[in-house]
Image (spheres, coloured by chain):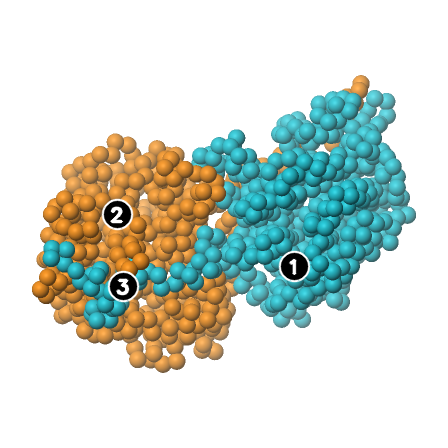
Chain colours: A cyan, B orange
Amino acid sequence: MCDQLRWDYLSCAGHPALSTPNIDALAARGVRFTRAYVQSPVCGASRMSFYTGRYVHSHGAVWNGVPLKLGEMTLGDYLRPLGVRTALVGKTHMRADVEGMQRLGIDPDSIIGVRVQECGFDPYERDDGLHAVGPDGRYDPRQPRYNRYLNDMGYAGANPWHDWANAAAGEGNQLASGWAMRNAGKPARVAERDAETPYMTRRAIDFMREADAPWCLHLSYIKPHWPYIAAAPYHAMYTARDVLPAVRAPAERVDPHPIYREFMALKVSRTFARDDVRATVIPVYMGLIKQIDDQLGILFRFMQERGLFENTMIVFTSDHGDYLGDHWLGEKDLFHEPSVKVPLVVYDPSPAADPARGTRCEALVEAIDLVPTFLDALAGDWRQHAHRLEGRSLLPWLHGQQASAWREFAISEYNYAFLPVAQSLGVAPRAACLFMILDRRWKYIHAPGFRPMLYDLETDPDELRDLGAEPAYEGERRRLADALVGWGLRSAQRTTRSEGEILAAYGKSERRGILIGVWEEDELQPELWWEYLGKDERG
Amino acid sequence: MCDQLRWDYLSCAGHPALSTPNIDALAARGVRFTRAYVQSPVCGASRMSFYTGRYVHSHGAVWNGVPLKLGEMTLGDYLRPLGVRTALVGKTHMRADVEGMQRLGIDPDSIIGVRVQECGFDPYERDDGLHAVGPDGRYDPRQPRYNRYLNDMGYAGANPWHDWANAAAGEGNQLASGWAMRNAGKPARVAERDAETPYMTRRAIDFMREADAPWCLHLSYIKPHWPYIAAAPYHAMYTARDVLPAVRAPAERVDPHPIYREFMALKVSRTFARDDVRATVIPVYMGLIKQIDDQLGILFRFMQERGLFENTMIVFTSDHGDYLGDHWLGEKDLFHEPSVKVPLVVYDPSPAADPARGTRCEALVEAIDLVPTFLDALAGDWRQHAHRLEGRSLLPWLHGQQASAWREFAISEYNYAFLPVAQSLGVAPRAACLFMILDRRWKYIHAPGFRPMLYDLETDPDELRDLGAEPAYEGERRRLADALVGWGLRSAQRTTRSEGEILAAYGKSERRGILIGVWEEDELQPELWWEYLGKDERG
């Protein structure tokens, strides 16, 4: 998994200037999904859906830093009973439900407690990749092993993650911090092999070398997520000439939806609306992607030498995209394709997948489909978990089959209470929810308290025209709003009884003596009546 | 709390033949809510909403025997930190999430493990009150202390709950089991003082005698729930002459809603459709209520002698009603008033409640309002839990005030997969959900896969005319369906961060070095830039 990688910044996805031969080669051996959507366009919420196989509305971790509530099962909880070691190298952006652990007496130092805090993964090398420090201290209290590694390699200081890997040399004895985007084009102070992406790739290889049992590895790169800064030669591999024009129109700024207007007013959006910012940052964003592709080449070669390509499913994806100035926005958070659509390439080693190799799949798929896919590939029976898992196995698509009764809508959510947007609009946190429902043509955004937004991806693939207020489209809006109703009322919390258990339990209570609506004993089977109800204990 | 007591079977609620002076006296000292609705008209699901303060769609324990998922907080979890001992005497119908406890390593014999299995209560005398036995064994594996008590009192046998308390003497050496309703009018074999209701009342008094700290007691009677059988003299206190005519009309059986039709076809409904059954059972149902009222008289006198009326809030309610043949139905399960509306009388000892004593409140209130009410009365600050609690404090109503911005709709849910209804209709468990949304006039029932049902409580208070298919009411149906949308999309799972915590966290990440959208260092406060980003660790 990459962090903040747009769906369209791969050569196999059609980027004209960026070359990603190793990811392209994976796509040539697997299936590339062209309509893959995350369940929320923000790191934490999106990842909790990837890991739980459930919508944000179901798991409740609606934004970065909102703890995943105790009891939500994650990938590791599903795979561990199958004898699969499920480990993490890199980022999760998961906050543990410490209060819940205390209430239920779960020792944070116990094996279970540690796994709970690691989002269900076995710890190997967790590094959420944001080691910023400010007047109030560290953003992430955990000191990463990566910092110790950099110190050992001679990069001095308390936080070499910033001072070397995410800063360039400035004037005099100054640092040119990667937090200031004007420095994006300067080379980071670390040697390329000591940058985050190669380091994490080596840690993944270490894990595969050490693994002595079936395993599932979540290799989770922090890049090309900000700070936008790359080590040489990647800092200069692309130039302003390689930058695609911004997908935006002056009309978008004319009487926009109030929520969209507030997002356009955010500092990051105003910054990315500038062409000089895009010309400086985007080449580095591309360089960071190129570095990931090169590192995946190293990883894939190692896996091939080890014969791991014969028995390992490989998924390449991202937790969300990056506007990069499109639609007058920076970062992610809203539901335009550059933000909510992600790359998804899946390689399945089984011969059953041969017919589909190198193909594209245009079905609507969601991040929550991965857990069912892994369960299906490993054990074949993911539907026994269908009372908890809200996604679907992708295996039919991976085998070139038409999945039966596939979903007609994809859903994504966003809570804007954690940005100045809700405050500006005077919306309380619990009301600051947005819901995107998308079919193969229409994208409808339900915004409680405001009018909806609507885009026609067929006639307006760049999403430059919001039809949410146009009377002519009331029918489409009604249809999509009604579909969202059914989704909102879905059964997602009855997680302690499966469909099969309910069907199997049917009629059992009478055999345990619960006899409802009986008038006289003759209505009962004699065995029930005589043995259990008629006998007089005195006799 | 009573079990299966209809809202209208109290003299203070207008029953012409039934006399409940002690409950009436409580109402004369408190407030009687005339529009109190349970969140599901079935024991287990309704109780889990009473205890969690959350809708069934949120806590997920959709029917009897569906475990309450680990992590859902209940009354005891909210009151314990306030130094309040929260105990149970009687029924909860709660199934523990044993699988979740195993997954998270919670020892069932630990204090926390025991509380989790007791639905958050401190154990005192749990007795779910259904000790049926059949060819497949006991319905409730727990042997109740009550059975040991009966044995000690000389009532022999392995299950005196059935053989003495819920059976009469039959012919010869036979038992006349309470499970056969034709026996309802015969006296149970136990002396009245040894019946379940007086026994549980004494256990409540024992608890109050022993209590040495602030406490909250859930006294939860199993009666007037079936088996319908009462000890003398209550078995004969009322006669067929006291039975009100069934609220039903032949028109209800003409082309009914498919789901309603299947409920009318259930054995218990066909039995209760018979006048001889009603004439036999209802007098005993009334006698069981009379017995509860007499026992509450004993309890209230004890509390008065102890001065407990000066500092104890008392709530009288039920988990759902009983059709008793109304609408051609038996049991509960659907949403007509006899099933989904419950009695609710609240006595608040505080002087602030004096203006409201003896009044009625017609506001729409729900079972989920009790936890916030207790928190409000004890600590005043229940809103800090508003990200988990979906109810509202009733304290303003109890103090004779107009609660601000009170709810406009009440919601109740039911999953019919656990009855033959879903099988008959070919509906899968996850789809077998019904949602009732009610305002002060209209009751709308959303039935996925079927047309809705609609009743006008103003022009048709007996709910004899389903307007769900009549074109003239499309507007009302649309309005109520739209209200249900907002409910379905509510924020109910973000239980690990409160509204206040979100507002307090706003803007904090920048002070921890997360600087988004910065182009050049000048945009930063000098302290941020120089101290944390500019310094060169080499210098």
Amino acid type shown at disc 3:
Leu
Q: Please give the chain letter of the residue carrying mark 1.
A: A
Q: CA distance from mark 1 to mark 3?
A: 46 Å
* Residue A483 showing in the rendered view: yes
Which residue position is annotated with label 1?
A: A395
User: Against B267, is A266 above or below?
Assistant: above
Circle 3 packing at 10 Å, graded few (<14), some (14-19), many (20+), is many
Give yes or no for contact between labels 2 and 3 (Cβ–Cβ under 8 Å). no
Judge depth for marks 1 and 3 and give the one in front. 1
Amino acid type shown at disc 2:
Gln
Q: Residue at x 60, y 45 (%)?
A: A84
Element marked by disc 3: loop
Which residue position is annotated with label 2?
A: B143
Instruction: Say which quadrant the C terminus of chain B sits in.
Output: top right
Which residue position is annotated with label 3?
A: A515
**Is residue B407 rendered to the left or right of residue A290?**
left
